[in-house]
Image (spheres, helix red, strand yellow):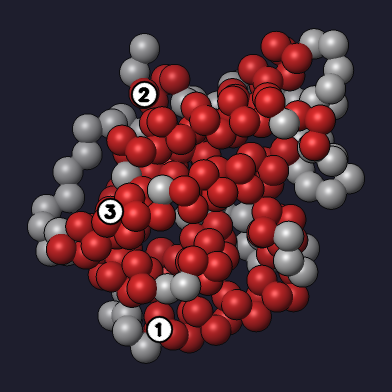
Amino acid sequence: MTRAERYAPASGVDGDDRPDLCGHDLQSVFQSLFDNHARDVRRYLASRAGPAVADDLVGDTFLIALQRRATYDPARASARAWLFGIATNLLRRHARAEIRYLRMTARDHGTQVTHGHADRVADRVDAQVRVRELAAALADLAPGDRDVLLLAGWGELDASEIGAVLDIPAGTVRSRLHRVRRLLRAQATPKALPSLEGERTDD
């Protein structure tokens, strides 16, 4: 099985993303969670800390979710936001790896981008090139600011979801996004910033 196949979302999945994680059919529920969200979680982790770290952390994310299933409150957050919260906390333990990866990405700016996976498409290639232009600035951000920005830009979470992930009000998320974007805009080339501005900020 290829990596693309392993993390491919299931077809015909249930649209309800607030499952009962303490029910009797845990295997089925967690298989559905993995099928629905593993690919997006891995993409987010790989963008921040590199593919090698991501492969380890995505497994850890779902293991912790299983172990802490009793703490999940569907009234507070969707399963997607909850999983991204676990992944973001794991990234904090690997902060050095993330900073190292971002700085390496910045050093590689201008080199040819190559891809070996069938699911890599032209717009994703272009986004990665733009991210290289901002990687050094991302590495220098305060951890909380970087979390907000990359949950929005790479995790594609909206302000309410990010608020649930980080346990802060959605208004604070919007404020941080505005401030960090303004800071990065001063350092970015005209094409660079859109790769981090494609997030949803609606509730």
Q: Residue 167 at x, y = what percent?
A: 73, 60
Q: Would you say the residues marked 2 and 1 are in contact, meaning their CB atoms lie under 8 Å apart?
A: no
The span from disc 2 to disc 1 (Cα, nearest Å) is 35 Å
Sequence-wise, the earlier of marks 3 and 1 is 3
Q: Is residue 186 above or below residue 129?
A: below
Q: Which residue is mark 2?
A: 3
| Label 2: how many Cα within 10 Å (few below 14, some 14–19, many 20+) | few
- Name the residue tied to disc 3: 101
For marks 2 and 1 on the same chain, the one whose residue lies earlier in the sequence: 2
Image location of residue 88, percent across then percent down: 55, 50
Badge 1 local density, few (<14 within 10 Å), some, or many (20+)?
some
Pair 2/3: label in front = 3
Q: Residue at x 30, y 66 (%)?
A: 135
Tag 1 residue = 185
Seen at 66% across and 75% down, the residue is 174
Q: Of 192 and 33, which appears nearest the observer?
A: 33
Helix or strand or loop: what does disc 2 sit on?
helix
Tell me the element at label 1: helix
